[in-house]
């Protein structure tokens, strides 16, 4: 028996889209910055700016319009897909008696047990990391205290050497 919801709709894509493959550069775009090589203090004429703007628009506008059209088509296809999906869900609900519910419950218990184990492991790891952080803090504090004590000892030794250094007697 084949359930009606198992069939793939005729309009569904079966292969990769005709767009660019991953990693291919987009045609017309370069990797260099648009500001690269510009000289800061060039005088700019309004007509030149207008012509450049028109050129830029004429270059990119068709691609943008095609992209807009493609997005509209995709949106329409999504709406159709959602409608189809809702229909398939309702068919699935009608066909639920065909499913082996016991197998689903067994699988659910299995995954629940996995989740419980993962939670236990996460709690254990949390405890371990907390202990490690606490120990690291204690070690850092101990190291700082030892460094402070060494510095104080050095200062005491320097002071003692200073006091022991022979001083010329004052003439009276």
Image (cartoon, rainbow, N blue to C red):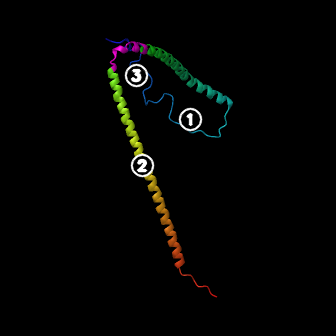
Label 3–label 1 contact, CB within 8 A: no
Quadrant the N terminus occupies:
top left
Residue 62 versus residue 85: which sits nearer the camera? 85
Q: Which of the two labelled residues, at mark 2 and mark 1, occupies the earlier sequence position?
A: 1
Residue 8 in the image: state x and y as whole percent. Answer: 38, 15
Quadrant the C terminus occupies:
bottom right
Q: CA distance from mark 2 to mark 3?
A: 51 Å
Q: CA distance from mark 3 to mark 1?
A: 33 Å
Q: Write the residue at 59% across / 25% down.
A: 57
Magenta residues, as a range? Answer: 89-101
Q: Which of the two labelled residues, at mark 3 and mark 1, occupies the earlier sequence position?
A: 3
What is the magenta segment's predominant secondary structure?
helix
Q: Is residue 138 visible?
A: yes
Q: Secondary structure at mark 2?
A: helix
Mark 2, Cα crowd under 10 Å, few <14 / some 14-19 / many 20+, is few
Q: Which residue is mark 1?
A: 34
| Res. 131 mark | 2
Q: Write the residue at 39% across / 43% down.
A: 125
Q: Write the residue at 37% across / 34% down.
A: 116
Q: Nearer the viewer, mark 2 or mark 3?
A: 2
Residue 170 in the image: state x and y as whole percent. Answer: 61, 85
Q: Write the residue at 52% across / 72% down.
A: 158
Q: CA distance from mark 2 to mark 1?
A: 52 Å
In the shown orientation, is residue 144 left or right of residue 41? left
Residue 52 versus residue 78: which sits nearer the camera? 78
In the shown orientation, is residue 170 left or right of residue 148? right
| Res. 16 mark | 3
Residue 111 in the image: state x and y as whole percent. Answer: 36, 29
């Amino acid at each position: 028996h084949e359930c009606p919801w198992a069939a793939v709709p005729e309009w569904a894509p079966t292969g990769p889209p005709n767009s660019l493959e991953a990693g291919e550069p987009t045609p017309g775009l370069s990797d260099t910055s648009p500001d690269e090589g510009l000289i800061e203090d060039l005088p700019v004429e309004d007509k030149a700016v207008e012509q450049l703007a028109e050129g830029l628009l004429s270059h990119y506008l068709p691609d943008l319009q095609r992209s807009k059209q493609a997005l509209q088509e995709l949106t329409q296809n999504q709406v159709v897909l959602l409608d189809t999906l809702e229909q398939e869900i309702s068919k699935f609900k009608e066909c639920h008696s065909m499913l082996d519910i016991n197998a689903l419950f067994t699988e659910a218990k299995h995954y629940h047990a996995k989740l419980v184990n993962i939670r236990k492991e996460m709690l254990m790891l949390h405890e371990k990391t907390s202990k490690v952080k606490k120990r690291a803090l204690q070690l850092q504090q101990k190291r700082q205290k030892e460094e402070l004590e060494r510095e104080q000892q050095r200062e005491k030794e320097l002071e003692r050497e200073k006091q022991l250094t022979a001083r010329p007697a004052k003439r009276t």
